[in-house]
């Protein structure tokens, strides 16, 4: 293992914070009287309509029916008005108003009328009605008509908003992102900056007879910084920049997407030279199907309009379309042809050097301990994207904050990596003693086979602490960035994956379910060795590769070869796995004492560094010979 540098590698000093401009005092807003006019009109209406009734009710006394009859017989009642529901109102001789409720029998038997006739009281009758109900019934058609006109007006405004493009112009307020904020990817940045330079100074290219690209497509796995590169273009370019997402063109109403595309390009041409950025273009640029040939599919109409705008009769090269996707295999071929997207730029997962630069960008402004070495962290994160690395730094900072520390240590990055790769470590999960011992045997088998195999990646750490779904883990860190793998390295990788199962077979005489994920990974690797890499002597130099996709989307269950070929593939895959298990079992048998020592040490300390594994394995190891066809193996430290 190389000696670790004790000095941290940090990025350039942080940018000086911009001093915010003092907020300007907004001009006084004029008083808003619209709401008060409505409230005042409502109060006047209530006063006009309900005021007389309320005033009349306040001056009217409610009397029992028997008291009213007594006053009638005593000639104290001057007038009486009888309602259809038995409500009786009237006025006494002294001017006092009264009201009472006559029982139903008094109306039907004539008891009330006989008393009123005997006293010669002036009597009148009226039909009892609900005034509020009559008001609502009379005003309801008018209110519905007014509401209908208001809804149609709002609908027209919303339709005009739907027809407008949802592109955000970044010319007035440019992002702060620059190409210096995008670590690594120097070739990608150079190609993109060349497009911006063409728009800013087209004369330099026209002297050589060069024509600028119509479109630039950024392709790569998720999290590699495609949108970040577009933000950097918006920050660096001195031309109008329009940003829009692919899904914003697709609406429920037919024709809106095509209308938005036309309006977007018309606006871009009016401010040309300019750049249009379409994020996740596969939302509208997917392959067209036969079912949509009739033109009734909204997405296909939008795609057709986009094709026409990018390479129509106008022949305008002052507008460049910048787009990104992580599903290039799903895009329509007409969209990818030269003349539309002339330049396709791959944005792959960052290399070792790029990961170091990306980490240096994300640790700006953070306090790092002296034991933090960004190059070591970069080596320990193969396959991490830029977004994964940003999440790794943030997770390490969170772990330091939980311990009330302002300084981030190397152990924080190790724990953060375990958290992201394996899952959260649950301290409440406890293994049975026999399970804990079996996990130690399993992980010791992985580590010892990796340490004794000539081309396997070095062991960095081994632990039996459960994290996520894993009961233990053996971490291997490659010393260099590999882009080419030899046949022996692949066979060693199979042996390392099956080393845990082989250790269980050696110690206990039987395997367990703990090797399920190891078997799945080893089987997947063996299938690729047979089907794609041509490493099977029986099948020969024949390859049946699966179409590459940045997103891990499983395709159809079919395969482009006969069933007889599938039987050969299955037989060869099983043979590769059996040979790898035999090699691992033989290797552990010859080093049984080292295996027992490593298991005992692991049970005692629970987590061991890689150098402990190599110390226990010893300075040398004999070559192990297994069945025919297995490559010769020996140990290198």
Image: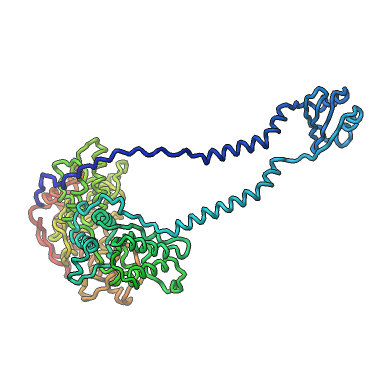
* Left or right: 512 in relation to 86: left
Whole-percent x, y for residue 29 in the image? 43, 39
- Please provide percent x and percent y for residue 30: 45, 39
Q: Quadrant of the image for the C terminus?
A: bottom left
Using the rendered image of the protein, determine whether residue 445 is visible from the camera's viewpoint.
no
Q: Quadrant of residue 122?
A: top right
Asked whether residue 383 is in view, the answer is: yes
Colouring convention used in this rendered image of the protein: rainbow
Task: Name which residue lies at 14% across and 58% down.
Answer: 480
Image location of residue 400, percent across then percent down: 23, 39
Where in the figure is residue 411, as x and y percent of width and height? 19, 43
Horizontal side, residue 93 vs residue 311: left or right: right
**Front residue (pair 30, 540):** 30
The answer to which quarter of the image holds residue 399 is top left
Residue 27 vs residue 357, the one in the foreground = 27
> Residue reaching furthest left?
619
Q: Is residue 316 above or below residue 86?
A: below
Note whether 271 is above or below 597 in the view shown: below
Is residue 484 shown left or right of residue 38?
left
Report the residue at 70% width, 27% height from top.
58
């Amino acid at each position: 293992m190389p000696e670790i540098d004790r000095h941290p590698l940090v990025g350039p000093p942080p940018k000086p914070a911009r001093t915010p401009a003092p907020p300007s005092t907004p001009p006084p807003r004029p008083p808003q009287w619209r709401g008060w006019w409505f409230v005042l009109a409502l109060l006047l209406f209530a006063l006009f309509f309900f005021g007389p009734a309320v005033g009349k009710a306040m001056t009217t006394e409610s009397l029992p029916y028997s008291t009213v009859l007594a006053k009638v017989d005593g000639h104290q009642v001057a007038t009486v008005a009888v309602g259809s529901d038995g409500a009786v109102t009237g006025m006494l001789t002294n001017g006092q108003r009264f009201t009472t409720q006559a029982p139903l029998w008094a109306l039907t038997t004539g008891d009330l009328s006989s008393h009123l006739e005997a006293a010669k009281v002036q009597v009148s009758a009226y039909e009892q009605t609900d005034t509020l109900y009559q008001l609502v019934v009379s005003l309801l058609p008018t209110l519905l008509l007014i509401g209908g006109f208001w809804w149609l007006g709002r609908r027209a405004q919303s339709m005009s908003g739907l027809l407008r493009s949802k592109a955000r112009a970044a010319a007035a307020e440019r992002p702060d992102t620059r190409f210096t904020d995008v670590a690594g990817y120097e070739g990608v940045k150079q190609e993109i900056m060349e497009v911006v330079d063409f728009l800013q100074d087209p004369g330099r290219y026209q002297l050589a007879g060069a024509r600028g690209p119509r479109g630039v497509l950024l392709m790569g796995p998720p999290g590699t910084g495609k949108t970040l590169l577009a933000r950097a273009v918006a920050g660096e370019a001195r031309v109008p920049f329009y940003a829009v997402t692919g899904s914003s063109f697709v609406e429920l109403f037919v024709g809106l997407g095509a209308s938005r595309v036309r309006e977007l390009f018309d606006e871009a041409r009016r401010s040309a030279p300019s750049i249009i950025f379409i994020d996740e273009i596969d939302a509208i640029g997917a392959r067209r199907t036969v079912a949509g040939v009739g033109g009734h599919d909204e997405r296909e109409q939008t795609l057709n309009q986009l094709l026409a705008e990018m390479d129509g009769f106008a022949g305008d090269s002052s507008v460049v379309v910048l787009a990104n996707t992580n599903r290039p295999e799903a895009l329509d071929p007409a969209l990818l042809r030269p003349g539309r997207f002339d330049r396709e730029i791959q944005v792959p997962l960052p290399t070792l050097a790029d990961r170091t630069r990306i980490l240096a960008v994300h640790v700006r402004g953070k306090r790092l301990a002296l034991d933090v070495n960004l190059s070591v962290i970069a080596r320990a994160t193969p396959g991490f994207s830029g977004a994964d690395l940003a999440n790794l730094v943030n997770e390490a900072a969170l772990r330091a904050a939980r311990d009330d520390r302002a300084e981030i240590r190397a152990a924080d990055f190790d724990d953060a990596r375990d958290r992201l790769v394996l899952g959260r470590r649950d301290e409440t999960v406890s293994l049975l003693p026999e399970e804990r011992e079996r996990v130690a045997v399993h992980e010791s088998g992985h580590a010892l086979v990796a340490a004794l195999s000539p081309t396997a990646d070095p062991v960095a750490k081994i632990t039996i602490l459960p994290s996520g779904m894993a009961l233990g883990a053996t971490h291997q860190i490659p010393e260099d960035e590999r882009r080419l793998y030899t046949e022996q390295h692949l066979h060693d990788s199979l042996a390392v994956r099956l080393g845990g199962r082989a250790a269980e077979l050696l110690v206990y005489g039987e395997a367990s379910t703990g090797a399920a994920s190891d078997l799945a990974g080893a089987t997947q690797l063996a299938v690729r060795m047979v089907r794609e890499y041509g490493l099977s002597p029986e099948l020969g130099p024949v390859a049946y590769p699966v179409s590459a996709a940045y997103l891990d989307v499983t395709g159809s269950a079919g395969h482009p070869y006969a069933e007889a070929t599938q039987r050969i593939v299955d037989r060869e895959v099983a043979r590769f796995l059996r040979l790898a298990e035999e090699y691992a079992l033989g290797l552990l048998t010859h080093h049984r004492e080292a295996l027992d020592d490593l298991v005992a040490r692991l049970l005692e300390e629970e987590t061991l560094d890689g150098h402990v594994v190599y110390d226990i394995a010893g300075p040398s190891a004999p070559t192990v010979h297994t069945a025919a066809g297995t490559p010769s193996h020996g140990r290198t430290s």
